[in-house]
Structure formats: C-alpha cells, structure tokens
Image: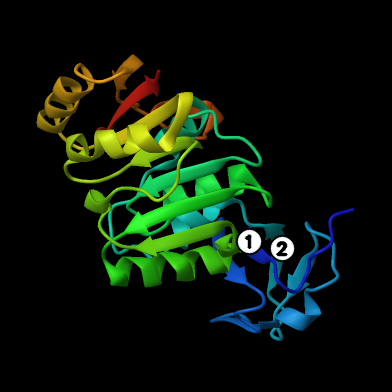
Amino acid sequence: MSVIKKEDTVIFYDRDKNKKYIINLALTPKFGTEYGIIEAENVVGLEYGSEVKTHKGYPFVVLPATLHDFIMYKLNRLTQIVYPKDAAYILLRLDVKPGDRIIESGIGSGAMTAVFAQAVGKNGQVISYEKREEFIKNALSNLRKMGLDDRVTVKHRDISEGFDETDVDAVFLDVREPWLYLQHAYNALKSGRMLGILVPTVNQIIKTLEMLENMSFIDIEVLEILLRHYKTVPERLRPEDRMPAHTAFLIFARKI
C-alpha cells in the first residue's frame, strides 16, 4: 500500500480531459481549479490511485508525480533543459549509482541535477558549479519542490578556477566552451570513470574532440538521440505529426 504523505508531490489527474495538475502538497495546501478546491489535508493518508472530489464534487484521481512529469510539465525554466531522452542515456553512460559523488556544471534550471540527485540516492552527492545566481535560486527552488535539494551542493563560481573535489565518480559539463575545462574534469575524476559533455553545435564537438585527443581519455563517443512519439489510437496507429528533432549532441570519454 502506497500512502500519500504531506510532503509528497502528486498529480491530480482529470480523466475526462486527460489532463495532469502537478502539486506539492506541502507548498500548496489548497489546490484550486474552475471545478472547485481540494484541501491538501484531505488527501494526506489516502492511497495513491484514490479518487478525490473538489468542494463542488468534481472528481480527480491522485497519482504519484514522477520525475519525468515534474521536469516536463512543472519545472520552472530559465534555461534550455536536458530532455529525458538525453538524460537517461547520460545517466547510464556515466554509470551513476546510489552513493556516488557527481560533479556537474552548470546547474541551468536543475533538470539534469534532479536526475543525478535521484540516482545517487540519500547517501550520494551532486556538486553543481554555477556562476549565475539567478539560475542557482531557480534550480534550488525546483529541487526543493521535488524533495531532492538535500542531495545537492551548489558552488556559486566560475569553473575556470577548477573543481575543489577529487576522486569523483563522474563529471558532466553543460557549458558553452567545455574544451577549456577538460583538464579540470580530468583532475577531479577517479581513474577509469566517465566524463559527459552536452553541446548544441557541431563546432563545439570539433573543438572538444581536438582537445580530448591530446589528453589521457579513451572510449570516446559522440552521438545524438532522436525520439519519435506515436498517436495512441489503435484504429489509426501512426507517428505524431510533429517530432522534436535535435536537442543536443552528447560526448563521452573515460579517464585513464
């Protein structure tokens, strides 16, 4: 039995309209729509999957909000985010596990930070370097709503000064000129562990590869991931009319 707790982030799902409302119960004691109000205190203690009604009698189903739900539909964005299709591969390629220590730069809106924080668990740590204060404030607000902020340490500074940490389990760079910081990443990594880099343009890939060739990195990979959704109508199964194509290029390399 999965019981709703007062600090949970939940989905109020409108079955008639196939619409999700994502709410943190601790931060939103009253959920209001045109169909009426639901008091958070009346939801706490129920089982997930229960039906609740507004004071006007309109029904919603209460579901647990996944990290994907929050990132795609609730995250407050000040920057372009790392999309789930890329984030999942990054997580596997960097071999992020419970208890790991991960360095990332920069924090952006906190989407990839949240993915790392969920993966490292309560005994792990994500160290995020970011030079823009407005990004830090927004990302930490997003992380608090997901209950993941206690796993993240943010350092407000430019990574041109290097990283404080050594022997970390992975480094992820989402910065404009990653080739300038490869030595810093190398110094921070454990031997045999992975560096991940996200860039939007081919020009950035070329400069990064040129630098990697002159360093002690192996197992170098460059790729992009394309995702195509299908209409969920059995009688007319076909791809969606529009497809988000390029989001980013991913570069991976292993320290030796």
Counting other residues with Cα less than 10 Å from the Cα at mark 2, is it few (<14), some (14-19), or many (20 or more)? many
**Quadrant of the image occupied by residue 244:** top left
Residue 120 visible in this rendered orientation of the protein: yes
Rendering coords of residue 15 (x, y %): 63, 58
Residue 68 visible in this rendered orientation of the protein: no
Rendering coords of residue 99 (x, y %): 65, 42
Say which quadrant the C terminus sits in. Answer: top left
Image point 39% across, 22% down: which residue?
A: 255
The answer for how far apart the CA atoms under marks 2 and 1 are is: 6 Å
Disc 2, SS:
strand
Tell me which amino acid carries mark 1.
Tyr
Tell me which amino acid carries mark 2.
Val
Question: Vertically, is 90 above or below 14?
Answer: above
First reached walking from the N terminus: tag 2 or tag 1: 1
Image point 28% across, 52% down: which residue?
A: 80
Q: Residue furthest left?
A: 203
Rendering coords of residue 35 (x, y %): 60, 80
* Image side of residue 134 versus residue 49, left or right: left
Question: Vertically, is 151 above or below 45?
Answer: above
Image point 43% across, 27% down: which residue?
A: 194
Disc 1, SS:
strand
Tally of marks: 2
Task: Name the one closer to the observer, 152 or 77.
Answer: 152
Q: Residue furthest top?
A: 219
Residue 13 is marked as: 1
Rendering coords of residue 230 (x, y %): 44, 31
Residue bearing the label numbered 2: 62
Question: Vertically, is 212 above or below 102?
Answer: above
Task: Name the one closer to the observer, 192 or 46.
Answer: 192
**Quadrant of the image occupied by residue 166:** top left
* Image side of residue 198 versus residue 27, left or right: left
Contact, CB < 8 Å: mark 2 with mark 1?
A: yes
